[in-house]
Amino acid sequence: HMRQMGEAAGIPIEPESQTRLLDATMDMEGVLLAGVPGAGGFDAIFAVTLGDSSSNVTKAWSSLNVLALLVREDPHGVSLESGDPRAEEITSGISSVQIEQS
């Protein structure tokens, strides 16, 4: 539908080459959905995969010079954090440092 909307507006939201890539991706086993994020254009696509099928998508995209940026779900699910969880290890390391004067 994005392609049709872009054609109607005269804007290349989903260029033909992206449509072919998305269609091929959707035909792969384990791919739940694929599309063009945001306002479209020619800069990005996405695919949501099940299990280990992301490796097949990565191989297919790489053969077409498309870089896959992989992300995975957190095994703990969604949680409320008080601060940036990436900084916890750094913060605890800094708070355990003791400076001795000579």
Image (cartoon, helix red, strand yellow):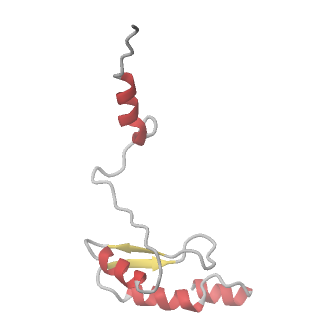
Residue in the picture at 31% in, 80% down: 56
Q: Residue furthest right?
A: 10
Q: Residue furthest top?
A: 102
Q: With respect to residue 63, does 88 lie above or below?
A: above
Task: Give the image location of residue 72, x and y in percent.
Answer: 34, 61
Q: With respect to residue 16, does 95 lie above or below?
A: above
Task: Give the image location of residue 102, x and y in percent.
Answer: 39, 7
Quarter where residue 25 is shown: bottom left
Q: With respect to residue 55, does 3 lie above or below?
A: below
Q: Nearer the viewer, residue 73 or 99?
A: 99
Image quadrant in which the N terminus is located: bottom right
Residue in the picture at 30% in, 76% down: 55
Quarter where residue 73 is shown: bottom left
Residue in the picture at 73% in, 85% down: 9
**Number of marks drawn:** 0
Q: Residue furthest front?
A: 102
Q: Nearer the viewer, residue 80 or 25?
A: 25
Left or right: residue 56 compared with residue 25: left
Task: Give the image location of residue 52, x and y in percent.
Answer: 25, 72
Residue in the picture at 59% in, 69% down: 38
Left or right: residue 52 compared with residue 45: left
Q: With respect to residue 95, does 43 lie above or below?
A: below
Q: Nearer the viewer, residue 96 or 10?
A: 96
